[in-house]
Image: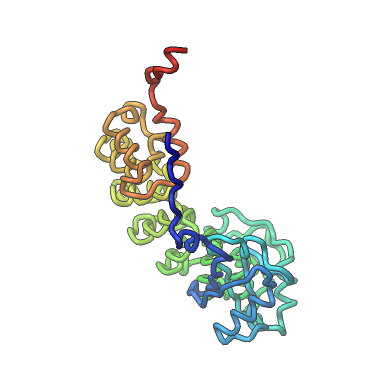
Amino acid sequence: MPLRPKPRVPENAWSILPTGPPPIKVVCAQHGTPLCEVQPKASWTLDNLIREVSAATSMAGDEFRLLWAGAPLAQGALPGPLLQIGDVSFTVYAVRVNAAWLDTLDSLLEKELPEVPSIEDICAGRMGGMEKPPSLTTANRDIALAAVQHSGSMLLQCNEELLHDKEIVLAAVRECGLALRFVPEPLRSDHEVVLTAVGSDGEALKLALKEFQSDHEIVTAAIKQEGEAIRHASHELKQDKSLLLTAIRRSAKSFIYVPEVLQMDKAFVISAVRVNGDVLTYAPQGIRTNKEVRLAAKAYWAGEGDAPPHGDGWIRMAHLWKPKDTKPSAAARVA
């Protein structure tokens, strides 16, 4: 029996594989705008990264600080994930600082924050548990602006005047959408502030005023960030099939917040399964076993749905679409 020839590997087959770390994206922490991309090397330290960012942005190296994973990058070698070979690019955030007050900023960030009051107390203007006066005032506004870019919860350290400073509030909710709970009126009723907050964390929608939970643009931004935030949308918007499908595509679990009448609507469930096959996990039993629904799920996991399948979907497919027992082979029957 002749041997089969080995398949030929195209000459450029290996050229598509990543050979080094992907570019690092640098974004302005205050405005959320891209500043530059730099190509790191495996031996890079923080100083190397600062020099490259400085050259690309014309900012002096001592005029900004780089944050990653919610904390400033430390001196020495960059964290492993930033230098890992692959195609996943990470983002670091640049915060404008001043060497004259950098130590003061760090000491404020290291202080233990006062007890966080409840949402009800905040909305009623009762800030119980905060006996100490705020550390951040208009006298050190620059420090306050940098502080909230490090952690949105630093709004708790701002005095009343700073809490009504829209630039500071926007920077805070961009870093942490849930910092919206600390924002007083009238900025709590500001469309841009709420839109920025839900774009950072979709769950911030639960802290928004009722009028914003009925706002199509704000709800869309929230569910694109966190699909399950659809549960905080108004009753009217929960009837919007397009919005529901956007949420389900982001998270299959969003299906449990779909109105019951739509959960039993075969046509809608088929549409939902075609954007996220894991919807079968949450669909009612009577719909889940429907042949057309299951065929739609199979199409999704085969890459023929209305959205690309994710990794968990392949595991789910292997579980739900286990092939039936087949007839034994001729060799097995002989044995």
Across and down, in percent, residue 110 comes to: 73, 66
Q: How many callouts does the rendering have?
A: 0
Identify which residue, 106 or 237, lies in the foreground.
Answer: 106
Residue 62 occupies quadrant: bottom right
Across and down, in percent, residue 264 comes to: 29, 33
Q: Which residue is drawn at 49% across and 72% down?
A: 32
Residue 171 occupies quadrant: bottom right
Identify which residue, 251 or 243, lies in the foreground.
Answer: 251
Q: State whether residue 20 appears in this view.
A: yes
Q: State whether residue 142 appears in this view.
A: no
Q: Is residue 174 left or right of residue 151?
A: left
Q: Residue at x 58, y 65 (%)?
A: 21
Identify which residue, 181 or 333, lies in the foreground.
Answer: 333
Image quarter where the N terminus lies is: top left
Across and down, in percent, residue 164 comes to: 53, 73
Residue extending furthest toward the front: 1
Colour logic: rainbow
**Taking 294 as reference, is 153 above or below it?**
below
Q: Residue at x 52, y 65 (%)?
A: 173
Residue extending furthest toward the left: 267
**Taking 246 as reference, is 183 above or below it?**
below
Residue 314 occupies quadrant: top left
Across and down, in percent, residue 119 comes to: 55, 54
